């Protein structure tokens, strides 16, 4: 049975930066509160569509792997914030990649864990021989769906995207063990009202969102789910925390990351942290952090990676990945986003004006 090696990686971060101080200009909050409670200093706000970001990330990942669109058998797009509900997001990405016409294209929505659930799906299909080459993307355009009147959530999230290429190989690499899970009974503690069919016939405007968000309960479930899944994969793989070279966790809150690392027995020097620069980008968080860990030289040939995550649902997971024999790109793409013309604050003020009224669900 073949393995599924990660042979390409690419990220796309929108350039506009929204700092904590920017948010404090229109909301009762402060840089001090946000930094001490979450570790977040700034996040990105997209001036473009999710498809635009996914196209750039995908082209960079393909160039890094040294393959072309025609080589792809499947595109998986992990996201909760689709440009359109129908048609799906992955088909829009396929259309932007020359040569990819005709390959499979599917979306996975498990909120912040969507990229990792997609990684499991593509890996399993490569192992069965159903496909050979897959593109797995994690991306989110959260800012248009944010309730910019709610300080409990508005300070936590950001936009971004990243992609990886998976290829069939006989080498001992790729996902070695995973644990996928979901606390379905707690799904109501993280809910975005105004984004689905429930609201169509209820005199609600779709897109005018209100977040149900019980931060402290999510915090506890996040720590328990990520810790349990991490312990489970290490035990079943016959490994211990000492075998982990680098942990690339979901980044929602620095305190959550520190708790999970401590429970797993992994020192923070082995944990890749980027939450201070991007906030929580949901499905984009782990793949963006992975790309940057590789760029920073922290993922080496043969490295053992642990990637725990959690998200709405409440889904959780952990993946144990063995890196292959290459952590440098084979090629580089010249794909870029169109230039931005507005600042992050101007984009957010536009959303606030468009949805200025508060809606009770
Ligand atoms: C959201 C979170 C940062 C809040 O931190 P916390 O320490 O639990 O803070 P609390 O909820 O106890 O709130 C403390 C106070 O700060 C206030 N507060 C909330 N957001 C604030 C903000 N942005 N600025 C200033 N004050 C704020 C609250 O209103 C509360 O005030 P009160 O005591 O007068 O009622 C934290 O619970 C968290 O990160 N949870 C996980 C959420 C998450 O990661 N979700 C992503 C899922 S993928």
Image (spheres, rainbow, N blue to C red):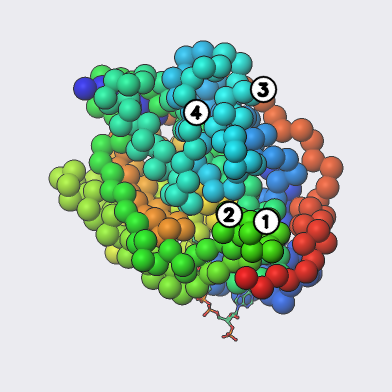
In the rendering, which numbered label is found on residue 105? 4
Q: Is residue 133 left or right of residue 240?
A: right
> Would you say the residues marked 1 and 2 are in contact, meaning their CB atoms lie under 8 Å apart?
yes
Give the labeled residue for mark 1: 206
| Viewer-proximal residue among 312 and 295 | 312
Q: Is residue 220 visible?
A: yes
Q: Position of residue 83 (x, y in %)?
A: 65, 41
Earlier in the chain: of badge 4 and badge 3, it is 4
Give the labeled residue for mark 3: 334
Of badges 3 and 2, nearer the viewer stands: 2
Q: Is residue 186 left or right of residue 39?
A: left
Q: Position of residue 41 (x, y in %)?
A: 63, 61
> Would you say the residues marked 4 and 2 are in contact, meaning their CB atoms lie under 8 Å apart?
no
Cβ of mark 1 under 8 A from ligand 1: no
In the rendering, which numbered label is found on residue 245? none
Find the residue positioned furthest to the front: 201
Q: CA distance from mark 4 to mark 1?
A: 26 Å
Give the labeled residue for mark 2: 196
């Amino acid at each position: 049975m073949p393995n599924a090696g990660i042979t390409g990686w690419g990220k796309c971060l929108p350039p506009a930066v929204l700092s904590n101080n920017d948010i404090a200009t229109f909301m009762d909050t402060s840089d001090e509160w946000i930094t001490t409670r979450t570790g977040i200093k700034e996040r990105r706000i997209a001036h473009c569509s999710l498809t635009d970001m996914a196209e750039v990330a995908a082209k960079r990942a393909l160039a890094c792997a040294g393959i072309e669109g025609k080589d792809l058998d499947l595109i998986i797009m992990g996201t909760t914030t689709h440009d359109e509900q129908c048609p799906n997001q992955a088909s829009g990405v396929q259309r932007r990649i020359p040569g990819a016409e005709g390959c499979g294209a599917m979306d996975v929505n498990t909120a912040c864990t969507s990229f990792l659930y997609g990684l499991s799906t593509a890996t399993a299909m490569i192992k069965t021989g159903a496909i050979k080459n897959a593109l797995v993307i994690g991306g989110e355009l959260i800012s248009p769906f944010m309730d910019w009147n709610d300080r409990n959530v508005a300070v936590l999230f950001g936009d971004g995207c990243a992609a990886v290429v998976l290829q069939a190989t006989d080498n001992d690499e790729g996902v070695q063990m995973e644990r996928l899970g979901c606390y379905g009974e707690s799904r109501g503690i993280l809910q975005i009202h105004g984004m689905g069919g429930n609201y169509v016939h209820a005199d609600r405007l779709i897109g005018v969102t209100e977040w149900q968000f019980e931060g402290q309960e999510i915090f506890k479930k996040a720590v328990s789910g990520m810790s349990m899944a991490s312990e489970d994969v290490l035990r079943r793989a016959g490994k211990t925390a000492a075998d982990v070279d680098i942990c690339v966790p979901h980044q929602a809150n620095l305190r959550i990351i520190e708790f999970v690392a401590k429970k797993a027995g992994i020192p923070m020097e082995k944990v890749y942290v980027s939450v201070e620069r991007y906030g929580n980008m949901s499905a984009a968080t782990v793949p963006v952090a992975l790309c940057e860990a590789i760029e920073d030289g922290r993922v080496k040939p043969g490295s053992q990676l642990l990637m725990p995550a959690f998200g709405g649902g409440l889904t959780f997971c952990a993946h144990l990945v063995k890196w292959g024999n290459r952590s440098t790109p084979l090629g580089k793409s010249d794909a870029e986003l169109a230039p931005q013309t507005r600042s992050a604050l101007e984009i957010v003020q536009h959303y606030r004006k468009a949805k200025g009224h508060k809606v009770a669900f």
